[in-house]
Amino acid sequence: MLDRRSIIAGGTASLLCATGLRAQVLPPQGFATPSGTVPFAPEVFRERRRRVMEALKDGVAVVHGAGPVESSAAVAPPFVQDGDFAWLTGIVDEPDAVLVMAPAERTIREWLLLPSRDVESERWEVERLPLGTELERRTGFARVSRTGGLGSLVTTLAERSKTLHFLGPIVSASAPVPKALELYGRVMQRVPGVSMKDDSALLPSLRIVKEARELELMRKAMAATARGHIAAMKQVRPGMTERQLKAILEEGFRAGGGEGLAYDSIVATGRNAASLHYTGGSGVIGEKDLILIDAAASVGGYACDVTRTFPASGRFTDEQRASYELVLAAQAAAVARLKAGVYYEDLVEAAKDVFRKAGRVDDFTHGLGHLVGLDVHDVGDMSKPLPAGAVITVEPGLYVQSANYGIRIEDLYLITPTGSQRLSEGVPRSIAEIEAAMAR
């Protein structure tokens, strides 16, 4: 007959076998996901979460990571983590992850939830870490569990706190309802007295001002970007296809230390350059063409953004020179007003005034710029005065399909208390600089 000690021992052994909690041989560092926090140590992200919870004071906040990439193509596009989730956790290689924060809890105030493992599918895709101390060490979270428990966790926390904080994103009425809003709706239907508070402006207000460590990565990305653009200017030849020049450009990014692309590179020649987000690559570069390249490298997940327009021949014609100088003047007019406290709309009007006086404002058919950071179109409220520490593009342009050209000059600026600093100064911009770089 089994005594109580035997029953307990046997039951424990059975539980360990059933739950997979028996001693496991873990993969070494550099194998399995999550690989760790990127691009900074866990302490950086823990401090960011502390700042968010300090602002919230109480209640519960849920932030969902991006879902997996779904594609029927033989080669699927790479997974890109949601910007808010990446900024708060540094976990960039786990789809469908969830962050839960509860500032008023006595002991544990933050949880990382990851999807359950599927060992069979991992044989085809990527190995994932089991729950345990190694997972906690890599992520910097004291509590890591599975997303299957998300509903019960948030319900329990909401019973105590009675407030659900919505951190965004705000989406259009035709877009899918954000996962956090769906979850909050279900919780409020089940827990009387729970209310929801809109805190969707909080993360953009924190992310818009770049930390010194973020700016360092953006400068590295810009150095790689400059190398690629200069390589394209030096090696372009009439008769090349856009795709061939794009290969030269992106190899320059890699040679300069770029770790990835900030966005899909645009290389457009002649008439194709008048299409703002041109996606082709088969155009053949003509001797008299202007070539527009809108492309940039990324480092540590941080983006930059640069556009240059230059002549395939290496020399601007008089007509090309006049239009190019007009775009450059419009950019200069906007940059002259760029400093902490300026309104974005005032920058737009400064650039448009230059085009209006020249009778060309109808050929300027897009916005003047956008914030840049962890996302190439980064978060931040551009209806409010722009703060020191924000990074923004200034990118006026002229687009004339009937004349077979588009001209855009896009530079990246760090806003300072008294003005701005051009982060993209290593990329030739003036006519003299471009012609000198292209001299053969």
Image (cartoon, rainbow, N blue to C red):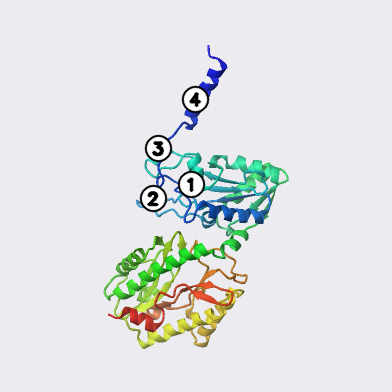
Query: Is residue 96 among what the camera can see?
Result: no
Residue, disc 1? 138
Name which of mark 3 and mark 2 comes first in the sequence.
2
Name which of mark 2 and mark 1 comes first in the sequence.
2
**Does dot 1 land on a helix, a strand or a loop?**
helix
Q: Is the residue under label 3 in contact with that under label 4 (CB below 8 Å)?
A: no
Residue, disc 3? 120
Of badges 4 and 3, nearer the viewer stands 4
**Pointer 3 local density, CA inside 10 Å: few below 14, some 14–19, many at least 20:** few
**Does dot 3 land on a helix, a strand or a loop?**
helix
Of badges 4 and 1, nearer the viewer stands 1
Amino acid type, mark 1: Arg
Of badges 3 and 2, nearer the viewer stands 3
Residue, disc 2? 72
Which residue is at a point 37% across and 88% down the rendered structure image? 318
Amino acid type, mark 3: Glu
Name which of mark 4 and mark 3 comes first in the sequence.
4
Which residue is at a point 37% across and 84% down the rendered structure image? 432
**Pointer 1 local density, CA inside 10 Å: few below 14, some 14–19, many at least 20:** some
Of badges 2 and 1, nearer the viewer stands 1
Marks 4 and 1, how far apart at CA: 28 Å
Q: Position of residue 307 (x, y in %)?
A: 42, 73
Within the image, what quadrant is residue 278 found in? bottom left
Toward the viewer: 426 or 412? 426
